[in-house]
Image (spheres, rainbow, N blue to C red):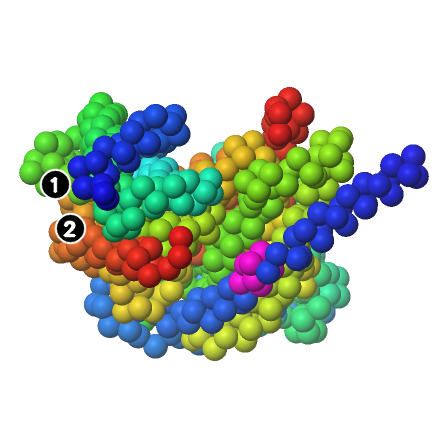
Amino acid sequence: MTVERESFWCLVHAEWTKLRTVPGWVLAVLVTIVAIPAFAFLAADVSGGCTQSSGGHATACPAPLTGPGGEPVSDAFYFAHQAVTGNGTITAQVTSLTGQVPAVPAGEVADGPGGQPWFKAGIIVKENTSQGSAYAAMMVTGAHGVRMQWDYVNDTPGLAGNVSAAAPRWLRLVRDGDTISGYDSADGTHWTLVGTAALPRLTSIVQAGLFAAAPSGGDSTTDTGVFRHVGLSWPATGWTGTNVGGTGPNGVPLPGSLRQNAVTITVTGSGDISPAVGNTGSVISLQRALTGTFFGLIPLIVVAAMFITAEYRRGLIRVSLTAAPRRGRLLAAKAVAIGAAGFAAGLVAATLALAVGTPLLRRNNMPLWPASLPTEARMVVGTGALLAVAAVLALAIGTIVRRSAPAIAAVIVVIFVPYLLALGPLQGANGQASLWPLQITPAAALSVQQAIPEFSQVITVYRPNAGFYPLAPWAGLAVECAWAAAALAVAYYLLRRRDA
Amino acid sequence: MSVDAGQALHAEWTKFRTVAGPAWLLAGVIALTVAVGAAADGAVQCSSAACAIDPAKVTFTGVYLGQAVVAVAGVLAIGNEYSTGMVAVSLTAMPRRLTWLFAKAAVLTGPVLIAAALAVAGSAVAGRLILPGHGFTPAHGYASLSAAADYRAALGAALYLTLIALLSLGVSAAVRDSAAAIGLVLGVLYLFPLAAAVISNVPISRHLQQIGPLPAGLDAQATTGLQNLPLTPWQGLGVVALWAAGAFLLGGLALKFRDA
């Protein structure tokens, strides 16, 4: 057993020697390593981002608004609030949530489905009334039931179903130091914990109250929440109405109001409290720094296919198979050698690309979405794996067809064409792309480079050219692995069955 | 003693038709182009009069894939001679190397043009059958799929595929290795539109779309929004022709002044 294992690594060593002693192949792998970071220089300039499509004139981008985590956020809503000190509880019953959507002029396309599913109104505890401050909120929504949301990016579901006078929703937030717990109830007596938010930025004095926000493309869309039985455990000082955010993206004052009578408090608001991925192009993805992966793939695929087809062309395959008569092991050794080369090249290239790309991307006047260290590590290791698996796929197809040109063309096509199709011809109405080519082909593996998460609470067009892919990062890589495994299985079968 | 052009053509035609590879590749061009085009027809949906989708571009989406098979055929026409050592025999029989290259080009162009025409015709039929069921109706402003612009788009798609074959032949003659040649050709084809999509600097992106053979060739297939295209359809085809001519010139010079 020990002998067999050693002989396999001897075989890998022999294949590695073949790989590294062909100057043209070494040069091609070096091109892979250089091309990926080099393209980061070209992709890093996002100066066109603030150009307004209607006028065609470039406008200065507003200073990015960032949340507690440093990520770009939207923070505009109508806030009926009072200052409260220390620990305590706010409770309210919501009896209705209605939207006021302006009629779409005839012949124009509505921007999305009107934004109604994520219309929101509820109770909120917020660091202060300035934009981007820390908060936790319990809310009813247009079509997603009760939610607890905090610090812009977090969203947890509570009671399902829409709010109405017949089915009111009770909401409660409890502050205990830095921790805020959200509860909901259908009857005001039986409470369920929805979520717990840790907000270390809260000071002793915070603002607690009622809010309404109506995410949409336009500034004149509002929604209205009707509250009853509003109760604070803190001493009540009376409600102040504040339009947090003040003006909309086009400079128009956001509509909003606070109306009180003996029984109800009615809050009408506009805007949204959410991560700022809402308008495509308003935030830059770190994924841009890795766009050169496409350029790096081509020389690597050429080398990986030639790694086996050159043996057939020169007749070396007969020598190789004489030295290693167990053909499956020869194929495995080749796969290990070329896979390792591809992985190392991808690792080095992606590290360099992120190192040069990150500061360049920050120089744009649009905000760069901050990527955590685990995300960056996943992007780098994932790019290495993407290249390694593409190389193994090229080796396997090269073994199957035994000719360079068709093998190389096949692998390039299954990675490049799906991406190009999703970018171009398969875009349908409203820019919504049909993304199935990026789910079933090896191009799915590009999802390991996604740097911004998709937020289900923000309705927008998540497109590949903005750095959003349809599959989860490792799921996409698994699709590419499945292709490579299937191709290797066929290659193994044919290599054993056919005369060399 | 040397062979004349007619004999050279005849010799190359015999080589071409007596191996199975080219026939399979050309059948692949037709099958893949039509299949991908039909899949794209089924995937798009025009829900209103303002959907701004070019039905001709959708119909000929298969060209994205078909051109890769055409490129393989073009590369192998020369690459096979070098990989098998046949080139020494060929050039001994036909010492006038450019005659040999032109004969190769002529023998390749005819069958590729026929395959491209069949692929485009098949795509057009698939588009006519499928697209009206996906919202491309007179009510949404798509009155007819048989206007002059559609014939021009079909002609553009077929000529584009043929020019890609010549481009590949030229590159293959210049680099003499089919692996490197196919990598170069597909890189030139696919990387221009990718770079144009990523680079947000508008003038640079537009220039990339003007000089890249694939984006320029796609302009030749457009039937709507022509005033917003980086190039007019015929200019687009002209750019592709320049690429093919440039590669052919390079290949011819390399062949003439270098040892085979």
Q: Where's residue A477, x and y in %? A: 60, 43
Regarding residue B252, the answer to whether it shows in the image is: yes
Q: Is residue B239 left or right of residue B23?
A: left
Mark 1: which amino acid? Arg
Q: Which mark is residue B152?
A: 1
Marks 2/1 in contact by CB < 8 Å: the verdict is yes
- Chain ID for label 1? B
Give the crowd class for mark 1: few <14, some 14-19, many >=20 residues within 10 Å: some
Q: Residue at image x 71%, y 31%?
A: A327
The secondary element bearing badge 1 is classed as: helix
Q: Is residue B84 left or right of residue B44?
A: right
Q: Which mark is residue B233?
A: 2
Q: Is residue B206 above or below residue A148?
A: below
- Chain ID for label 2? B
Mark 2: which amino acid? Pro
Q: Quadrant of residue B38?
A: top left
Q: Where's residue B196, x and y in %? A: 35, 60
Boundaries of the magenta span: A24-32
Q: Which mark is residue A152?
A: none
Give the crowd class for mark 2: few <14, some 14-19, many >=20 residues within 10 Å: many
Q: Where's residue A91, x and y in %? A: 62, 53
Q: Earlier in the sequence, mark 2 or mark 1?
A: 1
Q: A238 and A336: which one is in front?
A: A336
